[in-house]
Amino acid sequence: MRTQLEKIKSEVKEALNKVKSLEEVNELKVKYLGKKGELTQVLRGMGQLVPEERPIIGQLANEIRDELNKVLDEQVKKIKKIEQEQKLNLETIDVTLPGKQFLKGTKHPLSLVIEEAKQIFMGLGFQIAEGPEIETDYYNFEALNLPKDHPARDMQDTFYITSDVVLRTHTSPVQVRSMESLTPEVPVKIICPGKVYRKDDDATHSPMFHQIEGLVIDMGIRMSDLKGVLLAFVQQMFGPDRKIRFRPSYFPFTEPSAEVDVSCGICKGDGCKACSYTGWLEILGSGMVHPNVLKYGGYDPTKVKGFAFGMGVERIAMLKYNINDMRLFFENDIRFLRQF
Amino acid sequence: MRVSFKWLKEYVDIDISPEELAEKLTNTGVAVENVEYLNKGIENVVIGEVLEAVKHPNAEKLSLCQVTTDGKNRFQVVCGAPNVRAGQKVPFALVGAVLPGNVKIKKAKLRGTESQGMICSALELGINEDSLNPEQKEGILVLDDSATLGTSIIDYLGLDDCVLEFDLTPNRSDCLSVINIAREVAAILGKEVKLPYVRFKEIDKTTEKVAQVEIKDPDLCHRYVAKVVEGVEIKPSPQWLQHKLRCAGMRPINNVVDITNYVLMEMGQPLHAFDYDFLREGKIIVRKAHKNEKIITLDGNERNLTDEMLLITDPEKAVAIAGVMGGLNSEVTEKTTTVLIESAYFNPVNVRRTSTALGLRSEASIRFEKGINIETVVDAVNRAAQLLQDLAGGRVLKGVVDNYPNPIKRTIVELELNKVNDILGTNIKHDRIKEILKSLNFIVREEKENAITVEVPPYRTDVSIPEDLIEEVARIDGYNNIPTTLPFSATSKGQKTLEQKLRDKIMDIMTARGLSEVINFSFINKTNFDKLLFSEEDERRNAISVINPLSEEQGYMRTTLLPGLLDTLRRNIYRRNENLGIFELGKVYLPKGFPEKSTLPEEKWTLGIAVRGTLVSHWQNKGTVVDFYYLKGIIEDLLIQLKLNSIEFKPCKDNPSYHPGRTAYIYVEDELLGILGELHPQVADNYGLPQRNYVAELDVEVLLKLGHGPFMLKQLPKYPAVNRDLAIVVKDEIPASDLLKVISEVGGKLLVDIEVFDLYKGNQIPQGYKSIAFSLIFQAEDRTLTDKEINDIHEKIHKALADKFKASLRA
Ligand SMILES: [Zn+2]
């Protein structure tokens, strides 16, 4: 019997080397270990053994069965692994083909710049004001210290709707409108983004463009505060390493007035083609609110002071995104828009 | 304003380079735009004389010339200029010379003849085109007979100079004068100004004897000074004077005219020289024009005048438009011997109105309209007299006629010294403030502990209030010295208004749905209304017009976003971007009684959408072809995200720009929100668009009004939902919304959701009918529904559909 058992063991082991599929392993299992399997058959013959031999043979038989089960199981695992590998191999795809596209829309670069400016100024405590684009001569000029026949009206070529109504040439009329609605409250801290119109059309001018106006009125406001607020804005909009420079200028509604330059981001101020080798780029006009304008807005210029600034959104977007032609903003080429 | 650097140096000692000066001036508020060097690379060009000029043997248009540069040597030169003649003094580029643009002159053979150099034109020498007369633009530059042979042309024409090109702000019109710029330079550099020494002999005869001035409108002419000079010889001005005028971009004409221009540039005072012999009785009358009066101005144009315009006249005729331009009838010509020089102060507003009305701007008018220095009116006429004596051999009559009825006092401003630092945030010492003001020729009349009274120099017409003085101090002290601080006021974070937040949200939803934002011009061409098939009575034709548009294309303010959107589609399609999803969130402009009944028109925020083509295509599938339901899905999503209730889409057949069978009005809580649909094929054609475009227009104000604020969470259901399908066959014309309405009504509270999941028309059902299938979801909040309950409701729904719409169940 012992030899029979040993024979079964070696037979199974030998057979296992040849099997390739799970079915074959199962067949082996049934053939040797199943209810009618060879090992079972052998064990059924135990009764014929002498009593002393039974436990010894029984133990041997169990050992062989366990061992056979173990090797069979191992073989099953091995085959399963191979089969899975083969299956996965068949499932190989070209991972270099492009992925699914999700339709994504984009906001216009001018909207992005306006939104960013809004966020920066809201962080500094400004509210967002709005006003009409079709505006009276009074708010667009007169209340900004630009009476009829003032030579400085030439600075802005105006579109007229009637002799007394214009397309606003700047967002500054919102200054007076805001003051009127807020007086005598202080502080006034508003910005007003919006469309403005001037009779101009070339690569650097568009008859319609966008501005952001800013106005602060409070007791004890100084020109140095204007510098501080604009520096904070510029560094958040363009980067913390940027500097600003004030140059004397003239606007009828501010006195003193300043043109503000930001240091060139390309050459870091050393001078390059983009900044005409000056190291500086002009970005906005500003100044202390003219006493007459405060009066028009209903504030007493001996008690409160203010500053105001106005910037071209297109100009900022051009600098920020390296856009070289004003017309791109309004042609709305989808290949342009989708880059933002 | 363009000024010769050398000329400027005559009045103030400048010991820095032109570029350094330009930077300093710019940083203190008198911006220099550009420094232009006049010698643009000339080498070896000298004055030569044309000894001989004959026709070239082999070329009709060329001349064969002999040129000498010292009277002895001879160069054979082929010249193509039509004006070359023997005896002329000319700029001659020797072999080896260099001209602007790095043009090197070499020995050459032209039509078989050797040419040893070149006779130059003014343009070839790089001379400013504005300063040339037409003849000088075409031919060679002919020099004065007195020019010395062999002299470098650079020395002769003064090309070793540069021009400062100023970009002046309108308040600094005082700097339209070289002397006033010199004053500014002196203040910046801490130097003194050297004014020209004006001296001349006068004959015994007085100006008063031969000339009279009567001012009929003292409000429009505050001062009028005349001086007469006899025996002038009209000839070209000397080179040094011509050079200064050329630098200024002015064309030298003759000595008398050039002298008036010279004084205008030097002192900022416009002068006019009349030929005295054409002034009747030597009498000047300053008066308004008569209605329909006409005058031919120096430029040869006849001008129609209005009775608002001020004229210079003699007893019988108009001789000049005051402050704008002289008349042809009294112009200085070669035959003139006696001139009357006018130096006046005209009302700035009136000059501005006249010059604007006539479309005529001159060097004089741009100065008068900004206000000149009324105190130097006499100085200017004397300066002219001196130059007429020196350069035209004139005999100057004694004295002037000075009609100055109401002398103007100088402006006085009181300045609290502390205010300077209060406004600037600086710490400038009081002494420094006074020092700066004095350097700019402000006179401190009175000094108190903390305040000074300042007299403003008469040429600084822009200064009248303390803030103006503060700016003067700040700019000379340096804007860079102003520190950087933040406002005192407590910082609370700013907030957007509800409307602003709503617009942001709309943009977010639109972009999340794959649409790109566009921004179109607010103005449109009125032809769009025809292209959009608007009826004659359509309210939207009533657009606000721009009086002075750049072009007809931009003549009207848009009353609809469609033209901009459709033009954008077309522009993109032309560039082969055919699959498009765009939106614009912008205003339309509606008169609403403007201008008769309201001060301003209404500006209404509107959302416009346009989609077309195949979107999201991919190699795995062909993509989604945009159709009505694609656009409707976007809008439904928008309305759901904005938490709008009671949304209804109703078929729309009456909007002329839309496809009558594929368009719907959108209602929210019974209010019209907008419209969506397929663009009418004819409209698409009119805009050059290939077929099937889908557009929508929504009223943002309605969204704002009906959009609900914070919403309440619906509790998640605790009991299971049961899904039942219902497929029916009904007449095709019955809209799905009617069916859904009935199902929903009958289903009641337990029917929590309905979805259309299939639509079929075809062979298996009768013609004119459709099969439509709904998926119904039943659920109760408080229990699990039984089959019987659901079957009952289902049955009721079916019955209601059968009753109302003659619907039959489809197996
Ligand atoms: Zn740079």
Image (cartoon, coloured by chain):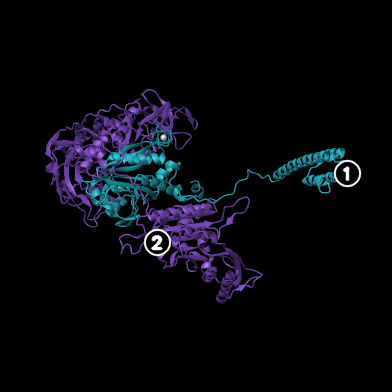
Chain colours: A cyan, B purple
Is B226 on the left-hand or right-hand side of B156? left
Nearest the viewer among B546 and A119 is A119
Q: How many marks?
A: 2
Q: Nearer the viewer, residue B631 or B687?
A: B631
Question: Does residue B520 appear anywhere in the picture?
Answer: no
Q: Disc 2 residue type? A: Lys
Please give left or right for residue B518 compared with residue B86 in the image: right
Q: Which disc is residue B705 wearing? A: 2
Label 1 sits on residue:
A48
The residue positioned farthest toward the top in the image shown: B72
Name the amino acid, label 1.
Gln
Quadrant in which the N terminus of chain B appears: top left
B255 left or right, relative to A57: left
Instruction: Report the front residue among B199 and A294.
Output: A294
Up the image or down, A174 lies above or below B784; here it is: above
10 Å crowding of disc 2: few (<14), some (14-19), many (20+): few
Residue B133 x/y as whole percent: 34, 40
Residue farthest to the front, as pictured: A51
Q: Is mark 2 within 8 Å of ligand 1?
A: no
What chain is tagged by disc 2? B
Q: Is residue B46 visible?
A: yes
In the picture shown, does residue B504 fall above or below B189?
below
